[in-house]
Every structure is written in structure tokens, then in C-alpha cells.
Amino acid sequence: MAMKRKVFLLALVLILLPAAINIMAQETVPLKAPEGFTAFDTPNDQGESVSLSWKVSEQDKEGVYYVIRSSDSPDGPWKEQAKVLSTIGHKSDAPLYFGVWKEAENKTWHFFEATDIPLTATTYFKLFITDNVNTAAAPEIVSAAPANNWFDTSKTNVLIFVTIFSFLILYFISLARKNPNLFIRHIPGLDAIEETIGRATEMGRPILYLNGLLDMSSLSTIASTSILGKVARKVANYDSQIMVPCYDPIVMSVCQEVVKESYIEAGRPDAYKQDNIFFITNDQFAYAAAVDGIIMRHKPAANIFMGYYYAESLLIAETGVATGAMQIAGTDAITQLPFFITTCDYTLMGEELYAASAYLSREPLQLGSLKGQDYSKGFIIIVLIIGSIATTAGSAFFVNLFKTF
């Protein structure tokens, strides 16, 4: 029996000895105090937090924590703000605050964002490192107060790109004022408008113009009414007739003023007929049926469809084909483009609709803006291509360029 007791005690000693040695080692190796502890207003925010930072230590490992305590006074009382694992939480984890260009340096600094603090007063902080046995405190008591930031430095890339694009647009506007014949890629559908109006005039039949089914808050409707003004001026010059049945009463009022102004600019205000621009209904298929009836009765020689369309696009365009009209369409409704392409002689696709006004008028402000936007898109495409190649090669420069500085 005595032998068994001795064996049991020996086994117990062997089991507990490593833990005892480890505890003794921890007690005999004190932790070093954190270095470089600072507090500052969190950058690029709206005055909602304070940031704390301190240097990464060789003591950082699993089982070691940093304890942050805060107080309204440097004399306390102190409350625990957070307890964070020493292996996580670095400046490099917050590129919106500290940027991406100093990623290697940011990895050598811990970072903590304190949000549970008074937003209108200064808060004081203490920092401790602990392994739950030993504890060491940073010698500094630091303080900071949240403040609004005037400029968000993480958006510096946006500022640079906007500056470049604005310069390009202003440069081409200036160039267009000196030379209104700046080259723009030819758009066959717009080149054919004058031919279409001339054909209708020779046949003694009207031109039908539709603005789509959206109201005046839509960009496509605004672009359509702008094109209508250029078309109406050519119609006035040719002494022809234009009919504009409208889906929205506000659009009708705008179109009446646009067409009237075009006739005045053409020197033929007496030829303007307000009744040719009229409201039908704001019900989709009732509108389509009414327009089909107008096409069948008046048999316009030219149908021009500009704006945003839905399922009625094919119904209207097919009716125009049945009457032998020459048809030009332009829309940014991707789902309706196939129907216009198959039923119309010419189709403006996507942003060609927005470029049409500058293309037809050659007005320097619009023309220069169009050229500047085209060069800006070209610049973005080049950057994307170079960025794709660089990223494939392992460089994150261009990825970070579009994220933040």
C-alpha cells in the first residue's frame, strides 16, 4: 500500500512540475511597458471617436493582452475601455484612416478606435500589457478629444481624378470655342436625321417624334427633348410638319416650348402649331395603341423614337414598319435595344443618345464637354488595363489607387 502511495505522489509531481516551472518562469520574466503610446482624433471621420496607437512589441503573442482604461480626468477614476489580443489590431488594418502607401510601417503600430467616450470633451487614457500573471503599464497618460475633419484624405484619389477630368473638359470647351468643327465619331443615325426630314418634306407627310415613357426627371427624357429642339429647327427650315404625342403632361409642356423656340430661331414663328404637340395618356399600352392609330391614320414618312421605352417599343416600331416610314430610334433601355435594332433603319445605343445634342448643335459648351468626357473615359480605360497587368504581376499599386490614399 505504501508503495502505491509513493508511485501516485511521484506521478502527481511529474504532472504538476511543468505547470509550476511555467508559472515560476512567468513570475521571474516581467513584461516590458508598451512604448510610443499616443492618442489623437481619428482622421477622416465626423468627430465620432478617438484613436490610440502604440508600437508593436516582441512580447506580442497568444495569451498576451493590451488593456485600455479611460477617464474624464487624469486623476481618475478609470474604467476599462477594452481588452484586446496583442496579435491583432494594427494601423495597416485601417487604410481609410492611415492610407495604403505606408503599409509596412503601419504594421509596426497597434491601433484602437475608442468610440464609447464623450464626444464634446477630452478623454484620458492609460495602457497596460498583461498575460494574466504579470502586468506592465505605459508610462504616459495620454488624452485627446474628437473633432470634425475638414477634408477626408482617403478621398484624395477622387479629388485628383476629378481635377484631371475637369481640366480635360474645360480644355476642350475652350478648344471648341475656337474650332466648332472638332472631330466626333460619326453616328449614322444622327447623320440620317436631315435626310429623313427631307424625305418627309418631299412626300408631303409629317414627322412623328416620341420622347419615351419617363417624366422630365429622367436623363433620357431630357436628352430626348434636347434632340427634339434640333429636329424641330430642321423641320421649320424645311417647312414640314412635326407631331409629338406625349406620355406625360409636363413633358408635353416642355416640348411645346422647345419646339416653339426652335421655330422662332428658324425665323418661322408663324409656322408653329401648338396642337401638334399634345398629351395622350399616361397608361402604357393605351398610349401605344393611340400612337399606333396616329401612325396608321397620318402615315408619317419619318418616325423618330428618342428616350426610355418599355414593352410598347416593338408595338410602335412594327406599326411604323408596316406604313413604310423611315425610322430612327435612340434609347438607353438595354432590354429594348434589340427590338429597335430589328425594326428601325438607325438606332442610337446607350450614351449615343446623350451625345446627340452636342453632335447636332455643335454648340461649344456641349461639344467640349463631350470631347472631355470621351478623353476621361479613355484615361480610365488605360489605367484599368495597366492596373490589370500590374495586379496580375503581383503589384497592388493600382488596386490601392482606386481604393484610398
Image (cartoon, grey):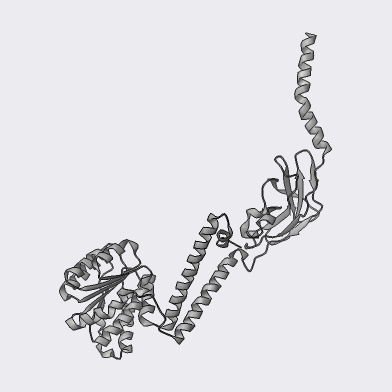
Would residue 69 appear left or right of 296 to someone viewing this image?
right
Coordinates of residue 332 in the picture (x, y in percent): 35, 67
- The answer to whether 108 is drawn above or below residue 329 in the figure is above
Q: Measuring from the top left, give residue 377's x and y in whole percent.
A: 47, 69
Quarter of the image with the C terminus is bottom right
Q: Quadrant of residue 310?
A: bottom left
386 and 47: which is toward the camera? 386
Q: What residue sits 75% from the left and 57% below the top?
A: 38
Q: Is residue 217 visible?
A: no
Answer above or below: position of 358 versus 290. Answer: below
Q: Which residue in the rendered view is the most extreme toward the right?
A: 28
Residue 102 shown left or right of residue 72 in the figure: left
Which image quarter: residue 270? bottom left
Asked whether 146 or 375 is in front, the reply is 375
Residue at 58% across / 66% down in the picture? Answer: 157
* Left or right of 338 in this view: 82: right
Position of 295 with respect to 11 (left or right) is: left
Marks counted in the figure total 0
Q: Quadrant of residue 314?
A: bottom left
**Residue 127 seen from this side:** yes
Would you place residue 259 above or below residue 45 in this image?
A: below
x, y (%) of residue 361? 37, 82
Q: Quadrant of the N terminus?
A: top right
Which percent across, then down, holds residue 283? 27, 65
Q: Nearer the viewer, residue 140 or 175?
A: 175
